[in-house]
Structure formats: structure tokens, C-alpha cells
Amino acid sequence: MEQNHIYLRLNSEPPNPILKKILCYPHFTDNIFSERLDELQSLQIDYFELQGPTIIDGIHLLGKGTRGIVVKAYSNNSSFALKIRRTDSPRLDLINEAKIQNIVNQFGIAPKILNFTKNFISMEFIDGFILNDYIHKFQNNLVSDLRHIIADLLYQCFILDINGIDHGELSNLKKHVIITDYAHIIDFDSASQTRKVSNLTSSAQYLFIGGPFSSYFQKIFSIDVNLLKTMLKNYKFNQNYDNFNNILEILDLHL
């Protein structure tokens, strides 16, 4: 069904009840709404475009997690994604997430951070498909396209590993990768620079061993699963380029 996009200005008087619900999801208070409206003004945001696959009380959004929701926003006619901290989030702010995402941006990973405050992160808007939807929609396309995307994703995971940044949620790639012509790892809310890294092993296990599309990937990639498990184990104990490249060779992937 085609969506009816709703454009929601932030300076309307009285404030739009939908705006109140979005800024203070899931629990509204006047004080929180006022504080967050001031934050948005500091980010020079003009309006929201309510669109996307996620629906909350009839409102279309780009995404929803346990700690935040994401909407499409505009400033000076330029669009971007805006992450909003949920009022029931166990995180006190989004600052650490934004700082880590800024770091990985230097490696060409994740949507580019534009600005951030305590309760908001504005970032590049990636117009693509979540991984599972992409596979459903395009699995009959050229296998070479899929190979290119998977190789790109695994390379990004390797770069995160060798730089000591663990995403924390790549054991379930379902909502943490957006596909365009490339793979885009998103949502660094659970990321850590102190935890043992497992980005590549987690992603490979989801894709090829225990995820919902593992049988599909095993077939089209002609994978020797036991050999792959051995190579992942070797990589786990020594995360170097040679062990990473061995994994690519088993999968017949090329960067």
C-alpha cells in the first residue's frame, strides 16, 4: 500500500499532537517536550517527513528500537535521518553513540554524522533496504551483485575489528544493515571500544551458519560449513588480514 507522506513543521502553534508523540515517545511530559523542542531548534531543523516502514500508532517512521526512534527530517531543504532518544531509554543520552559513529565514519562506515545533542543525532539519510528485505526482493538478481555487497559488509566488519570497535548487535543483522549499491552498517547504540570485538564472526555466523538465510547463502556460495567454522575460529584468535582473507577465499569473495 502506498504511503501518504505527512510533513510536520516544528514551529506550529499550538504544537501538533503527532509532534508531541514523536519527540516524547513513548511517555509525554510538557517539560521533556519543551526541552527537546529547544534542542531541535539548536539543530536548525525545519520539519519532519513522516514516512518509512515502521508504524507507531498510525505514524510512519524510518525505524524504531528499544532506545530510540528514527524519522526523516529537513533543514534548509536538505533531508537527513534524525535519531530521537526514547523517553524510556536506559541510556541517559546519545552522545557516546554519536562519538563512536563519528569515529567509524573516518573509515567510511555508517551514515555520516551531521550533528548531535543529548537526545538527537542527525545523520546522512540512506535510502535503501534492510538486509532481509533486500534478500527477499532481489534474490533472483545477479549473484555477483550479492557477492559484492556481502564482501563489502565483511570488509567493514574487519575494519571495525582491527580498530577495536565492537558494534554489539551484528549477531542479528536484520535491522542493522541497510543495502543500496553497498552495505551500510547502522545503529551504533550498543557499540563499545572496550569490549572484545566480534563483528566479523558475528556477521558471518548470521549470514552463513545460523541466520534465517543461511541455507540460501550456503547454496549459492557453495560453502563448506565446517571449513568456514574452522576459519572463523582461527580469525577469532588472531584477527589479522591473512585470516580475514582466508575467509573471503572460502566464500569465493573478492574486494
Image (cartoon, rainbow, N blue to C red):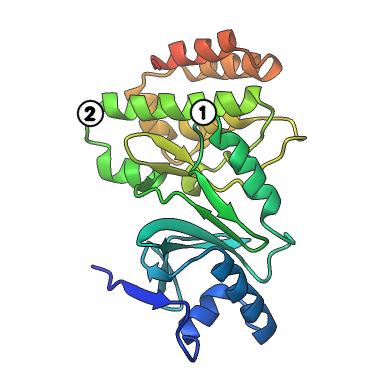
Determine whether 232 is above or below 9 in the image.
above
Number of marks drawn: 2
- Image quadrant for the N terminus? bottom left
* Residue 130 picture location, percent across and down: 40, 47
* Residue 244 picture location, percent across and down: 55, 15
* Residue located farthest toward the top when viewing the structure as drawn: 242
Query: In what element is the residue under mark 2?
Result: loop
Q: Is residue 168 visible?
A: no
Amino acid on which disc 1 is placed: Gln
Q: Is residue 199 visible?
A: yes
Q: Give the CA separation, mark 2 to mark 1.
A: 22 Å
* Residue located farthest toward the bottom when viewing the structure as drawn: 14
Query: In what element is the residue under mark 1?
Result: helix
Residue at the (36%, 66%) spot, across then down? 51
Near mark 2 (Cα within 10 A), the count class, few <14, some 14-19 or many ≥20, is few
Residue at the (49%, 38%) spot, across then down? 211
- Image quadrant for the C terminus? top left
* Residue 195 picture location, percent across and down: 75, 35
Q: Are marks 2 and 1 in contact (CB under 8 Å)?
A: no
Nearer to us: label 2 or label 1: 1
Task: Give the residue number, with chain letter if any, for mark 1.
Answer: 156
Determine whether 96 is above or below 248 in the image.
below
Amino acid on which disc 2 is placed: Leu
Q: Which mark is residue 142?
A: 2
